[in-house]
């Protein structure tokens, strides 16, 4: 399942949990797994420069097919030399297919087997996304890892509604692979099926003939209770292909990163780290810190005593609280930098514990620290 541009080296699997450590080799560099991938929706991770992301250890970032198609346009990005040159990022990039945004952001008009016709959230103009168009846009973007066009079914769908969406996703997958031409881009199929185990299993079976370099699991972390997501991942774990990376889409809270890794997931992404940062919240080894709170007015300690990021080395909770409460953008930038650095450190710790054979102890210590919280 490898070619001259992509290969996956599975280095160790924890015999008790199935947690995996590996290296995914891509045209723009190696990715050590398990890995958290920051989201750069509009060809930038909000508030951070590429040099900042490299300093804090980002190996790969995501961009969004739907948003870049709308603005500035995939053909313009192609003329600029592709997304790597356009945004000055020389490490791997993953793009989604635009499917989730088409269903969640745009005003939907019609879903058919041909594709999805919708009105743009930007200016109301009408567009139709098809599997072929999703491939063309991602080819123009030039990302290393691209996603098949899929239909996300909402939490609460009936079994029949979820089946129709899953079957349509499977048919679209065939068309995506027929339209995919660039061997320097790894196309991942996406497992759908809503919250029905039989549909998830069937979706995985229908994906398997198209698994070349990796597989994604979509349609989770969309409002369901976390135990339900973990139950579905447990059910899929043994059936997932072992020799390619496994990507759980849209999941990025610290506890979900830990639990997903324990269920054999290799790649994760989520906007949570930067989104909560802009609201004044830090993710730390001792749980969340809402720095706008009054208790931090005269707290001259760093956000996280265990963190060596630029923010924690140089600034206090009192200063960050001041920035957030007066609306200074520097506060959101520093908190974003810290949150992403924290999630990278968490994933490095998980990887080292898998390789070292002490992942259960690492996870127990993670939960102990989270429950203890910050000193009062």
Image (cartoon, rainbow, N blue to C red):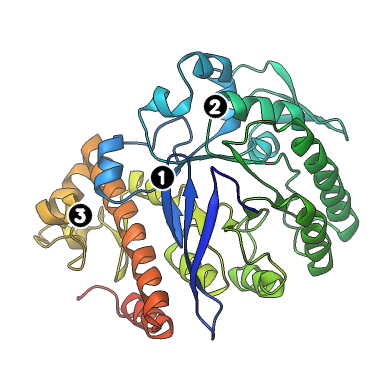
- Give the CA separation, mark 2 to mark 1: 18 Å
Q: Is residue 102 above or below residue 32?
A: above
Q: Position of residue 280 (x, y in %)?
A: 31, 49
The residue wearing badge 1 is: 29
Q: Is residue 199 above or below residue 353?
A: above
Q: Position of residue 195 (x, y in %)?
A: 75, 63
Q: Is residue 359 above or below residue 348?
A: below
- Give the CA separation, mark 3 to mark 2: 31 Å
The residue wearing badge 2 is: 141
The residue wearing badge 3 is: 309
Q: Residue furthest front?
A: 4
Is the C terminus in the top left, top right, bottom left or bottom right quadrant?
bottom left
Disc 2 residue crowd, few under 14, some 14–19, many 20+, Cα 10 Å: many
Disc 3 residue crowd, few under 14, some 14–19, many 20+, Cα 10 Å: some
Q: Position of residue 325 (x, y in %)?
A: 23, 44
The quarter of the displayed image where residue 373 is located:
bottom left
In-image side of 231 versus 255 (left or right): right
Q: Are the two marked residues, 2 and 1, in contact with CB atoms closer than 8 angstroms?
A: no
At 53% from the left edge and 29% from the top edge, which residue is drawn?
Answer: 142
Q: Are the two marked residues, 3 and 2, in contact with CB atoms closer than 8 angstroms?
A: no
Can residue 67 be spotted in the picture?
yes
- Closest to the camera, between mark 3 and mark 2, is 2
In-front residue for pair 295/194 = 194
Q: Which mark is residue 110?
A: none
Does dot 3 land on a helix, a strand or a loop?
A: loop
Earlier residue among tags 2 and 1: 1
Total numbered circles: 3
Earlier residue among tags 1 and 3: 1
Earlier residue among tags 3 and 2: 2
Q: Position of residue 62 (x, y in %)?
A: 48, 41
């Amino acid at each position: 399942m490898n070619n001259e541009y992509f290969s996956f080296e599975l280095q160790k699997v924890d015999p008790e949990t199935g947690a995996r450590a590996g290296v995914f080799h891509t045209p723009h560099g190696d990715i050590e797994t398990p890995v958290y991938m920051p989201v750069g929706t509009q060809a930038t991770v909000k508030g951070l420069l590429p040099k900042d992301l490299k300093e804090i250890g980002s190996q790969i970032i995501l961009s969004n097919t739907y948003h870049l198609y709308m603005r500035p346009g995939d053909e313009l990005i192609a003329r600029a030399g592709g997304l790597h040159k356009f945004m000055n990022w020389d490490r791997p990039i993953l793009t989604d297919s635009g499917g989730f945004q088409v269903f969640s952001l745009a005003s939907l008009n019609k879903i058919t087997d041909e594709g999805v016709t919708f009105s743009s959230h930007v200016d109301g103009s009408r567009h139709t996304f098809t599997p072929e168009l999703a491939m063309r846009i991602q080819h123009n973007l030039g990302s290393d890892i691209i996603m098949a066009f899929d239909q996300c079914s909402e939490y609460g769908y009936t079994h029949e509604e979820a089946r129709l969406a899953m079957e349509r996703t499977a048919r679209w997958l065939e068309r995506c692979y027929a339209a995919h031409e660039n061997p320097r881009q790894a196309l991942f199929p996406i497992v759908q099926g809503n919250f029905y185990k039989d549909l998830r299993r069937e979706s995985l079976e229908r994906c398997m003939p198209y698994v070349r370099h990796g597989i994604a699991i979509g349609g989770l972390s969309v409002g369901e209770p976390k135990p339900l997501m973990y139950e579905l991942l447990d059910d899929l774990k043994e059936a997932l292909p072992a020799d390619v990376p496994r990507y759980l889409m849209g999941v990025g809270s610290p506890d979900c990163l830990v639990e997903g890794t324990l269920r054999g997931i290799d790649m994760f992404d989520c906007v949570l780290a930067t989104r909560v940062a802009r609201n004044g919240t830090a993710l730390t080894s001792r749980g969340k810190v809402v720095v706008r709170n009054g208790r931090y007015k005269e707290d001259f300690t760093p956000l996280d005593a265990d963190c060596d990021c630029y923010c924690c080395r140089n600034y206090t909770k009192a200063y960050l609280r001041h920035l957030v409460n007066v609306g200074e953008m520097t506060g959101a930038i520093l908190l974003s930098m810290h949150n992403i650095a924290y999630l990278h450190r968490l994933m490095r710790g998980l990887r080292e514990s898998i390789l070292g054979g002490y992942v259960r102890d690492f996870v127990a210590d993670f939960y102990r620290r989270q429950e203890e919280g910050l000193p009062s």
